[in-house]
Amino acid sequence: MLDLPGPHSALYAHLSSVAVRRGHRVRRGERLGLAGCTGSCSGTHLHFELRRRGLRVNPLRFLG
């Protein structure tokens, strides 16, 4: 889970490895980890959620 500016956060799940740790300040373009197949999945992929105050929102509104 990444804390973003304001009330937003982002969840990146099913990573086979994580390149950052709690408290690390992430920079634009920095690798967070590698996509994988952990937990309940049928193949390698990234599960991404954007949240506002803990509630999921459609990330397409924020992607350019």
Image: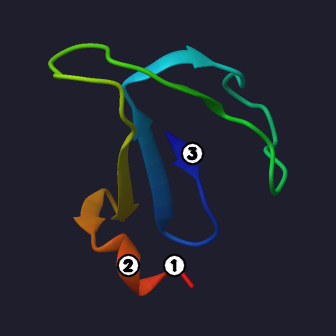
| For residue 11, side relative to residue 55 (left or right) | right
Numbered circle sitting on residue 42: none
Q: Quadrant of residue 39?
A: top left
Q: Position of residue 55 (x, y in %)?
A: 24, 62
Residue at 57% x, 85% y is: 64
Q: Are marks 1 and 2 in contact (CB under 8 Å)?
A: yes
Residue under pointer 2: 60
Give amino acid for label 2. Answer: Leu
Residue at 47% x, 52% y is: 10
Residue at 42% x, 20% y is: 36
Residue under pointer 3: 2
Residue under pointer 1: 63
Q: Do the residues labelled 2 and 3 touch (CB within 8 Å)?
A: no
| For residue 59, side relative to residue 7 (left or right) | left
**Vertical placement of 60 versus 52: above or below?**
below
Along the line of sight, the residue nearer the viewer: 44 or 56? 44
Q: Position of residue 14 (x, y in %)?
A: 36, 25
Q: Where is residue 27 in the image (x, y as percent from the top left)?
A: 84, 51
